[in-house]
Image (cartoon, grey):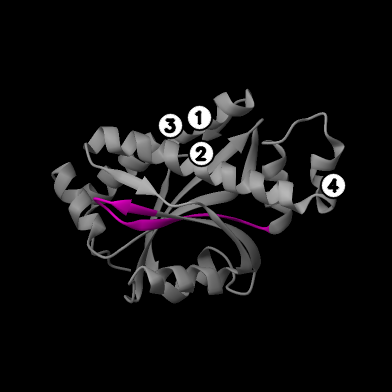
Amino acid sequence: MPSEFSTVQLDALKEVINIGGGNAATSLSQLINKPVHMTVPTIEVMAYEDMFEQVMSEDTMIDAVLTKMFGQAEGVFLLVGLEEDMKHLASIMLPENSETMLPENSETNPEMIDSALKELANILVNSFLNAVTKLLDINLLTSIPLLTRDMFGAIVSSVYMESGQYDDTILILKNEFYYMGERMEAALYFVPTPGVLDKLFSVLGV
């Protein structure tokens, strides 16, 4: 479908996301002392209803960690994945010598898993934004991460409405990360508030 953004604007945005995501992957690698790699960022403009066909079914139950961004630009970051995949993802944040922290035993300590997921989102988002603020010389802050479990459609709809996004056309920015050669079954999304991308393009000169 036609995009309201030019190819030059999307390429510039992809480069910013690539730099931020690379910084996030480096920070995570240093924290767990194991290599984490990032894919080339995906940027898609699509009709809202198409998202549930091309990205994920709206009735799929997921874990999502929500982090709000505010300051000179506003928006919401979402670290999203299926519950079992997110438990596996959280396990890399936890000590290897603790059996109660392994994915197969994580039901015995859900608070630890939840805490690890929120900390993971905090590291990814803030590492990402630290790179962006240095690149663009703007001031950005984040809220405390919040973890929620619900259907994908319900979570995304709530975020878009809260962000003032009522357009039928939506912009999806997504990075995926690889750990020990395997794709981490979760993705970091960014939902900008109206006008934020125009400001960003202005700073980038595109």
- For disc 2, the marked residue is 123
Q: Position of residue 3 (x, y in %)?
A: 27, 64
Residue at horizontal 33 percent and vertical 76 percent from the top = 166
Amino acid, disc 3: Asn
User: Chief secondary structure of the magenta span?
Assistant: strand
Marks 2 and 4, how far apart at CA = 24 Å
Gap in Å between the C-alphas at discs 3 and 2?
10 Å
What is the span of residues highlighted in magenta in the rendered image? 69-82
Given residues 45 and 99, the one toward you in this image is: 99
| Marks 2 and 1 close (CB-CB < 8 Å) | yes
Badge 4: residue crowd in 10 Å (few <14, some 14–19, many ≥20): few
Q: Quadrant of the N terminus?
A: bottom left
Label 3: which residue?
23
Q: Where does residue 61 sit, x and y in percent of width and height?
A: 66, 67
Q: Is residue 50 above or below residue 199?
A: below
Q: Which amino acid, mark 1?
A: Ser
**Disc ID at residue 104:** 4
Whether residue 116 appears in magenta in the rendering, the answer is no
Number of other residues with Cα within 10 Å of mark 2, as a class: few under 14, some 14 to 19, many 20 or more: some
Q: In the drawing, what numbered circle is on residue 27? A: 1
Q: Nearer the viewer, residue 30 or 39?
A: 30
